[in-house]
Amino acid sequence: MYQDKEIVCKDCGNTFVFTAGEQEFYAEKGFQNEPKSCKECRAAKKRGNKEYFVGVCSGCGGEAKVPFKPTEDRPIYCSECFAKMKEAE
């Protein structure tokens, strides 16, 4: 029923095979989307090999490292200011 399918990884650009067995597993679990990243890139994300961006904290003006590219329309916070905001909730 299922056939191996080649997919291009959105992270590294390499081609990987989405096997028939993996497709069957995805279907059994009710997953509707095919994987977009190869196994190596997915494993790297799980290990925490994320790219961090540096910006100015909107709370204290210090350095803030965040795992997403900051935009000027949204504030970013250093870990201390972020923790203080969470405590205040």
Image: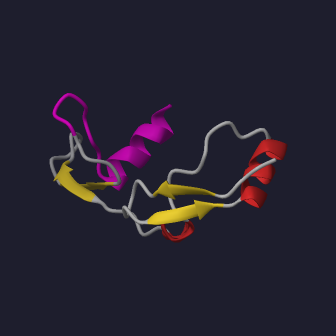
Q: Nearer the viewer, residue 15 or 30?
A: 15
Answer whether residue 11 is magenta in the image. Answer: no
Please tell me whether residue 45 is drawn above or below residue 30 in the rendered image.
below
- What residue is drawn where x is 78% and y is 43%? 27
Q: Is residue 25 left or right of 86 when viewed as pictured?
A: right
Q: Is residue 67 left or right of 47 when viewed as pictured?
A: left
Please tell me whether residue 58 is drawn above or below residue 7 in the rendered image.
above
The image shows residue 11 at horizontal and vertical percentages of 39, 58
The quadrant where residue 65 appears: bottom left
The quadrant where residue 42 appears: bottom right
Q: Nearer the viewer, residue 32 or 72?
A: 32
Please tell me whether residue 54 is drawn above or below residue 48 in the rendered image.
above
Q: How is the image coloured?
A: secondary structure
- What residue is drawn where x is 29% and y is 52%? 78
The image shows residue 62 at horizontal and vertical percentages of 17, 54
- What residue is drawn where x is 47% and y is 67%? 48
Q: Which residues are magenta?
A: 71-89
The image shows residue 36 at horizontal and vertical percentages of 51, 51
- What residue is drawn where x is 20% and y is 56%? 54
Q: Is residue 38 left or right of 19 when viewed as pictured?
A: left
Q: Is residue 86 left or right of 28 when viewed as pictured?
A: left
Answer whether residue 88 is magenta in the image. Answer: yes
